[in-house]
Image (cartoon, rainbow, N blue to C red):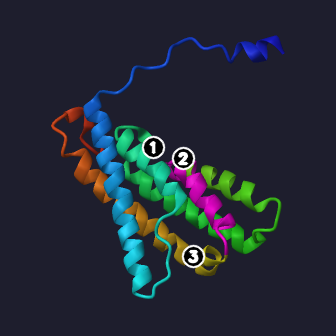
Amino acid sequence: MKNYFARMKTKGHCPPRKPLKKIVWSWVGAFMGILIISIMGREMHQLGMDNLLLIGSFGASAVLIYGAPLAEFSQPRNIVGGHVVSALVGVTVYLLLGEQSLFAAPLAVSLAIVAMHFTRTLHPPGGATALIAIIGGDSIHAMGYLYVVSPILSGAMVMLLVALLVNNMSRNPGRHYPVYWL
């Protein structure tokens, strides 16, 4: 037991706060990305298309792609692929087990992680995307595999386009995005 707890001792310190410029660019990107998805969702609703566009996992994606644009998890392949792969897994698990199964939620999230690893698209918010397919309620469940296209693919693409725009507006070459595409 002593060895187990010894593994939890820290060796370093909390890193320093990021420069104000990085914080401002992160704010601008997150604000614009979520705002555009919100506006699109509202417009779709007013046109009679009751399709949700704004889901919780996009908030977590915003932290990554605007707050840490150089991170592996933040690259285009990971954003789009991670969300799409996870949505496919989540919908499939829901269709096979339903939301009432004790195993639906843990299977959706854990299988999404496995699928993202195999496809090299690991994006932590993908776990939430898979979970939403299980616990999202009747409106999400009624979509079936359309959930993968909208809100997931369309929302991830909007977030990516905003990330490309905002992250490359900075004069700092250390912020230029993406690091890689495929």
Rounded to the nearest whole Å, what is the CA distance between mark 2 and mark 3? 21 Å
Q: What range of the chain is rendered magenta?
A: 117-137
Q: Residue furthest bottom?
A: 48
Magenta run includes residue 119: yes
Residue placed under numbered mark 2 in the picture: 124
Q: Given contact means CB atoms under 8 Å apart, are the residues at marks 2 and 3 in contact?
A: no
Magenta run includes residue 120: yes
Q: Residue at x 52, y 70 (%)?
A: 148
Disc with the residue nearer the chain's start (1 vs 3):
1
Q: Quadrant of residue 131?
A: bottom right
Residue placed under numbered mark 3 in the picture: 145
Task: Give residue 22's position: percent from left, percent from top.
Answer: 29, 34
Query: Dot 2, crowdedness within 10 Å: few (<14), some or many (≥20)?
Result: many
Q: Residue furthest left?
A: 171
Q: Is residue 127 left or right of residue 171?
A: right
Vertical placement of residue 103 versus 167, above or below: below
| Amino acid type assigned to the residue bearing label 2 in the image | Pro
| Amino acid type assigned to the residue bearing label 3 in the image | Tyr
Residue placed under numbered mark 1 in the picture: 73
Q: Is residue 122 left or right of residue 137?
A: left
Residue 179 seen from this side: no
Task: Give residue 145's position: percent from left, percent from top.
Answer: 57, 76
